Image (cartoon, rainbow, N blue to C red):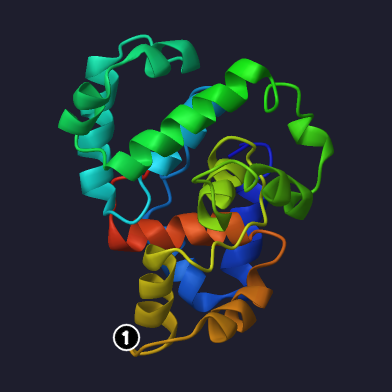
Amino acid sequence: MALVFWEQAVNDLSARDPVMHRIIQCYSNSMPEERGDAFTTLARAIVGQQISVKAAASVWQKVTTSIPEFTPKELISTETDVLRTCGLSARKVDYLRDLSHHFLKGTLVTVNWHELDDETLIRKLIEVKGIGRWTAEMFLIFHLHRPDVLPLDDAGLQRAVSMHYHASQPINKHAIRVIAENWQPWRSVATWYLWRSLDPVPVIY
């Protein structure tokens, strides 16, 4: 996330939310790292769908070992069996190939990412096979550094809000959205620290 707003976000969240203040104090040195290009970010988010952070990191390491020069062209050229051996499902292999075709055709390369608002970007991204709202939100958080994304479908966010705000009892998305109103316009930052409260090792996409 763009560090230009990080300090202000941390100060605002700490001032208005005692729970968030406590979590931030525990992980005050934690902030997102700048990572790779748009293709790599989206591919890594697809790999991470529906599996744990630890499992996703393991699969991703195997993928990048098999494809050291991780580009759309190299991914399409890689045998399906090699990708499956890395731990990818047949469906995710299909998704990654479709993503590669979109980049090679230029349909995503030409998008003016920084000129579009969050919801417009999400609608654009979910046109790609295998990219749903969650994957698009990870792209907005980790690649475009959008400060106010709330990934309601994220299991880690749901678990952390339940633990810190709801006595570890089940909590629905509407209730999470209501709690998160107090975090605006820094819901991405709040989500980041809630993730850290579950796993101090930062997730990367």
Which image quadrant for residue 140?
top right
Report the residue at 34% width, 62% height from top: 197
Report the residue at 61% width, 61% height from top: 187
**What is the quadrant of the N terminus in the image?**
top right
Q: Nearer the viewer, residue 4 or 90?
A: 90
Which image quadrant for residue 154?
bottom left
The secondary structure type at the circle numbered 1 is: loop
Q: Is residue 171 above or below residue 137?
A: below
Which image quadrant for residue 47?
top left
Q: Is residue 48 above or below residue 84?
A: below
Q: Nearer the viewer, residue 75 or 12?
A: 75
Report the residue at 58% width, 56% height from top: 133
From the top left corner, tell me how far across and down residue 201 is, in percent: 28, 46
Q: Nearer the viewer, residue 2 or 47?
A: 47
The residue labelled by disc 1 is 168
From the top left corner, tell me how far across and down residue 115 is, in percent: 84, 36
Q: Is residue 57 visible?
A: yes
From the top left corner, tell me how far across and down residue 57 is, in percent: 26, 38
Q: Is residue 33 visible?
A: no
Q: Is residue 4 above or below residue 73?
A: below
Q: Is residue 21 left or right of residue 167?
A: right
Q: Is residue 9 above or below residue 130?
A: below
Residue farthest toward the right in the current orientation of the protein: 115
Q: Is residue 55 left or right of residue 175?
A: left
Name the amino acid type tagged 1.
Ser
Report the residue at 43% width, 69% height from top: 22
**What is the quadrant of the C terminus in the image?**
top left
From the top left corner, tell me how far across and down residue 56 is, in percent: 27, 43
Q: Nearer the viewer, residue 162 or 7?
A: 162
